[in-house]
Amino acid sequence: MAEQKQHSGGREAEGPRHVAIIMDGNGRWAQARGRPRLFGHHAGAKRVREIVEACPDLGVKYLTIFAFSTENWKRTQKEVAGLMSLFRRYIQKEAQDMLARGVRTRFIGDRVRLEPKLVDLMDELELLTAENDRVHLTIALNYGGRDEVTRAARRMAFDVAAGKLDPRDVDEETLPRYLDTCVLPDPDLVIRTSGEARISNFLLWQSAYAEYEFIDTLWPDFTPEIFAEVVARYGRRERRFGAVLSE
Ligand code: IPE
Ligand code: IPE
Ligand code: MG
């Protein structure tokens, strides 16, 4: 398993190596302009590229973005269909560019409920960019933290039943190997835009010791400058991981 963070003692935070973003506020952004919600989703999608591009200079090697949650199916059929079509077109449009810019793209979330055409595009993009290493972009699509842990537990149970895993060996190192994020380090910083202060089922296991930033900016207004400010604030935080650093 790749580079799990040490949580054994406290230390001063440097730059965040892994930033995760809950890209929220597209609907309100569109509403404020008297436009349909999907207009906001398109504006939001356009922001992603510049945020990914800002990562190397900020020392961010891993960027994980929340694009669609397991709860977002509750939205109108029109919005859900519009989002799925946006994801398809986004992958088709950005694939070659991601390849050229050294972006390695992965997807997390349950693919079973997604339409096959979209899943094919996701698989192709993962394969296409598999050799890249400049920035690791992970897109959470039909992702829910509880769903992910549940699927992991189910797969572990199958491995136990098949005699491949001894129940006595199930510990805090074993479970994350079954998560969708198994090859990623834990996020150091989780940012949520749009002023809502909740995690909405995002990276529940992985964010146990992440630093959080809830900022008022709506996602389509989130610029690389704002991103840089948030990352700089992170650098001034003291991460203790439960330890006492100074008496
Ligand atoms: C986030 O923006 C994008 C998705 C959840 C797909 P929202 O669509 O949640 O925008 P608001 O929160 O309604 O403004
Ligand atoms: C979280 O935003 C999901 C994504 C950003 C994809 P939501 O807008 O769906 O979350 P709630 O409903 O406000 O908690
Ligand atoms: Mg929202």
Image: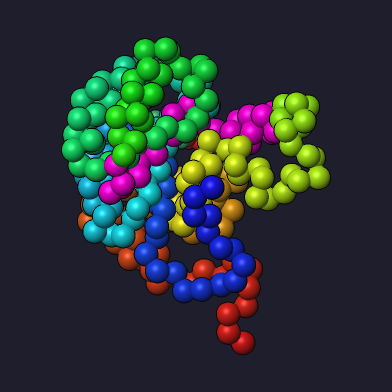
- Considering depth in this image, is 10 or 134 the residue closer to the camera? 134
Residue 20 on the magenta span? no
**Any part of residue 12 in sight:** yes
> Where's residue 94, x and y in %?
22, 30
> Where's residue 179, x and y in %?
58, 38
Q: Is residue 216 above or below residue 80?
A: below
- Considering depth in this image, is 78 or 206 the residue closer to the camera? 206
Residue 144 on the magenta span? yes
Residue 37 picture quarter: top left
Give the colour scheme shown: rainbow
> Where's residue 86, x and y in %?
29, 22
- Report the residue that reaches farthest toward the bottom: 247
Residue placed at 81% from the left, 45% from the top?
168
> Where's residue 65, x and y in %?
39, 40
Residue 21 as seen in the image, left or right of residue 175: left
Residue 8 as seen in the image, left or right of residue 170: left
Q: Is residue 172 above or below residue 141?
A: below
Image quarter where the C terminus lies is bottom right
**Magenta segment:** 132-156
Residue placed at 54% from the left, 47% from the top?
1
Residue placed at 43% from the left, 13% from the top?
115
Residue placed at 20% from the left, 42% from the top?
101
